[in-house]
Amino acid sequence: MFMSVGMINAYAGIWFAERGLSEMQIGVIGAAPVALMLALTLFVGRLADRASDWRQVIIGGMVVAGLAPIALIWTTGFVGILIVWAVLATAQRVSVPVADAAAMRLARREGMDFGSLRALATVGYLAVILGAGWLMGADGVALFLPLFILFGLIRAVFAFGLPTLRAKTDVGAERARLTIRWQPWFLLPILAWALMDTSHIVLNSFQGLLWSQQGIATGTIGALIALGAVAETVMFFSFRRVARRFSPLAVLGAAAIFGVIRWVGMALEPGIAWLVVLQLMHALTYAMGFLAITTFIADSTSEDNAAEAQSFLVTLELALQVPMLVAFGWLAGYFGALTYTGSAIMAVLGGICVIIAQRRLRAPSPRGKRA
């Protein structure tokens, strides 16, 4: 899945510009799938839970996302590219929470480590960025579309090889547990991670520019970004040891604390040595938090509603990220690295949500048990 994501994040903007699109048009193309995802992600998750197996929805998404890019060979002009890109990107992205829920459930049944499986996403992401960059460095950005189409088709073909992802004995069971998503002890951790994940927007969208303005060389910027991805991968592979000792909410609360420390540090515009430390903390602020909330959702749901719950998380994240991307972009233009103060505030709010959720879990219900 994330091989294509690597192509998009690193090189799609360059390819769009080569096709004659302006910066504003490129921004619209990037935003269109987000708008569609807000409308479709929760619906797709609910559809996946009602299907006999999650693989059907994953295969459908991967086939659409794999075939749609072929149309870009003949598509010219802003409107045509916008339509095709919105279809392919939305189909791929709405499948991610379903795949996460399915992988988590399958890993638990088979005694595997979900974190290690999820680490492969980062490995594939980095491999494509480096490998495709090397190829395109030699032959130019014209190779972007053939490679992008190739990765999409490979992903679609492999989707057909997915095993049965749901335990047949659990399908249709515990339908009443769908109501848990309206309980504060369940909603608050999801809101906490949505806030904490959104706090990474400055890092993901503007960090290269901010570091460049601080006089850091381009090569060093690339190395720092790669360092964060490596730290993320290490945490994915080693999270099982953390999960054995601490509850998901305790880990999520720790991720919030580390987030506050990291973003305050970024706001101070430290030197390279400190930036190395702060980038290594990506393992604690993102990877650890993501696995904690995914584990929490898996612990709190059944196979009857896991995909919908995971999709609800992504929908809430998108609802926060769309306005915050605009807000942080405006702040970055005026305040530079001090924009990270906003990220720190979001991490604090996330930590408060975790504390309240923990208290609600400890408090007995009127009937003497958790609702």
Image (spheres, helix red, strand yellow):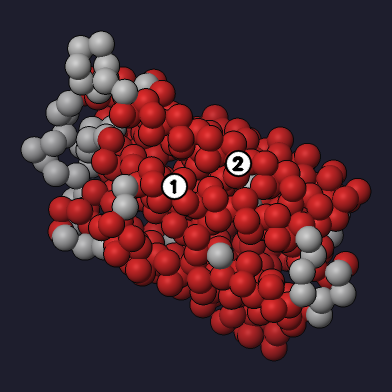
From what the image shows, is residue 271 above or below residue 88?
A: below
At mark 2, the secondary structure is helix
From what the image shows, is residue 132 above or below residue 148?
A: below
Most foreground residue, 252 or 63: 252
Q: Mark 2 points at which residue?
A: 348
Residue type, label 2: Val
2 or 1: tag closer to the N-terminus: 1
From what the image shows, is residue 87 above or below residue 223?
A: above
From what the image shows, is residue 243 above or below residue 79?
A: below
* Classed neighbour count for the residue bearing mark 1: other residues with Cα under 10 Å, few (<14), some (14–19), many (≥20): many
How far is the residue under mark 2 from the one under mark 1? 12 Å
Q: Count every numbered label the image shows and give the total.
A: 2
Q: Quadrant of residue 83?
A: top right
Task: Point out residue 115 in the picture as x, y percentages from the top left corner.
Answer: 34, 62
Residue drawn at x 78%, y 61% as measured from the top left = 268
Which residue is at the far right? Answer: 334
Q: In which quarter of the image is residue 217?
A: bottom right
Which numbered marker is on residue 104? none
- Can residue 145 be seen from the camera position used here? no
Task: Point out residue 56 in the picture as x, y percentages from the top left corner.
Answer: 29, 44
The answer to whether 183 appears left or right of 258 in the picture is left
Residue type, label 1: Leu
At mark 1, the secondary structure is helix
Most foreground residue, 330 or 341: 341
Residue drawn at x 60%, y 41% as measured from the top left = 348
Which numbered marker is on residue 252? 1
Residue drawn at x 29%, y 62% as measured from the top left = 240
The answer to whether 82 appears left or right of 336 in the picture is left
- Can residue 314 be seen from the camera position used here? yes
Residue drawn at x 63%, y 67% as measured from the top left = 278
The quadrant the C terminus occupies is top left
